[in-house]
Image (spheres, rainbow, N blue to C red):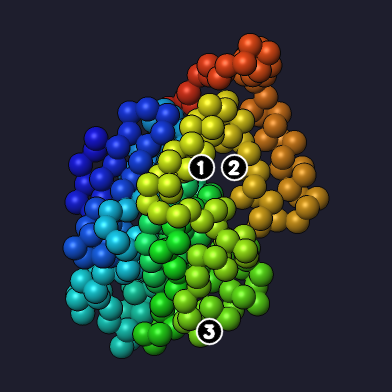
């Protein structure tokens, strides 16, 4: 169990769980959150042991989005001169990187929303691989309602997950998206009756992912993300280059043997990443 100020992280096995645990603050994203999240996700990814990460929360609200305390420092938000605006932009880019950490991770990330997901929460879950929710978990792009526009990933990722016209409607109006409609649109993989059913379902999905060869899952995620942002021809070439890089006969033999013996395969974890800057 790793100690963080803005969430709880349980790791140590193939399935890790990152839990937003400030229910008294509606799990709003404070300064510590933006600093800690990308570091925690990168550390899990670099270690190589994690095969899937579950993102969930305590309390009735999944997250209310950005904590107002982030806006408390006038020095960080000053835009009265060109140099101050440049500094503002540079600082804001770091917020985008926090959620991009989910995409850069070598494992899939599953969002399990037990309650409402507002503002920055939509930015966050749009960067996850899979999304599940309870019947109480509505979503809303809140930024339009408070005089700004979403700038941490919603407008870039959401139109790749649901029809662009619907994404525009939600962003322009700031209206609430029900979990039932979100599932019909394909944003949610499933809607479960309550929090217990949500946890059971997501845990089962995570176990299935964790039982697959880590190299194959990591390569699949990379290929999906590349294809999202590139033409089909480029994506096909990228996929073949990636396949040639990750092809592992040992995993293939073990997968086939395990299938014949009706058991889960036993696969080596991903190799730890040793960064040159460490």
Q: Can residue 71 be seen in the rendering of this structure?
A: yes
Marks 3 and 1, how far apart at CA? 30 Å
Q: Are marks 1 and 2 in contact (CB under 8 Å)?
A: yes
Is 198 drawn above or below residue 155 in the view shown? above
Please report the residue visible at 38 percent of the width from the left and 56 percent of the height from the top: 114
Q: Which mark is residue 108?
A: 1
Marks 1 and 2, how far apart at CA? 7 Å
Percent x, y of residue 278: 33, 35
Q: Quadrant of residue 138?
A: bottom left
Label 1 SS: loop
Percent x, y of residue 112: 43, 51
Q: Which mark is residue 116?
A: none
Eye-nearest disc, 2 or 3: 3
Q: Can residue 277 be seen in the rendering of this structure?
A: no
Q: Are marks 3 and 1 in contact (CB under 8 Å)?
A: no
Label 2 sits on residue: 221
Please report the residue visible at 42 percent of the width from the left and 29 percent of the height from the top: 14
Asked if residue 157 lies left or right of residue 150, the reply is right
The first of marks 2 and 3 along the sequence is 3
Label 3 sits on residue: 172
Please report the residue visible at 37 percent of the width from the left and 47 percent of the height from the top: 196
């Amino acid at each position: 169990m790793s100690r963080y100020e803005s969430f709880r992280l349980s790791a140590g096995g193939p399935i890790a769980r990152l839990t937003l645990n400030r229910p008294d603050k509606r799990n709003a994203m404070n300064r510590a959150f933006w600093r800690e999240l990308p570091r925690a996700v990168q550390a899990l990814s670099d270690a190589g042991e994690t095969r899937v990460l579950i993102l969930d929360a305590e309390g009735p609200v999944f997250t209310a989005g950005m904590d107002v305390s982030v806006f408390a420092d006038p020095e960080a938000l000053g835009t009265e001169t060109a140099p101050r605006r440049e500094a503002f932009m540079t600082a804001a880019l770091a917020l985008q990187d926090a959620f991009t950490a989910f995409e850069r991770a070598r494992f899939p990330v599953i969002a399990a929303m037990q309650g409402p997901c507002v503002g920055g929460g939509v930015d966050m879950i749009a960067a996850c691989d899979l999304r599940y929710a309870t019947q109480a978990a509505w979503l809303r792009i809140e930024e339009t309602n408070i005089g700004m526009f979403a700038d941490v990933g919603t407008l870039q990722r959401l139109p790749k997950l649901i029809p662009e016209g619907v994404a525009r409607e939600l962003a322009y109006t700031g209206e609430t998206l029900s979990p039932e409609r979100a599932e019909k649109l394909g944003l949610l993989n499933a809607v479960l009756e309550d929090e217990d059913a949500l946890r059971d379902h997501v845990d089962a999905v995570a176990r299935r992912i964790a039982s697959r060869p880590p190299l194959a899952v990591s390569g699949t995620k990379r290929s999906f993300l590349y294809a999202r942002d590139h033409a089909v021809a480029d994506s096909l070439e990228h996929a073949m280059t990636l396949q040639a890089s990750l092809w592992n006969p040992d995993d293939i033999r073990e997968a086939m043997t395990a299938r014949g013996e009706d058991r889960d395969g036993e696969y080596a974890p991903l190799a730890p990443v040793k960064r040159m800057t460490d």
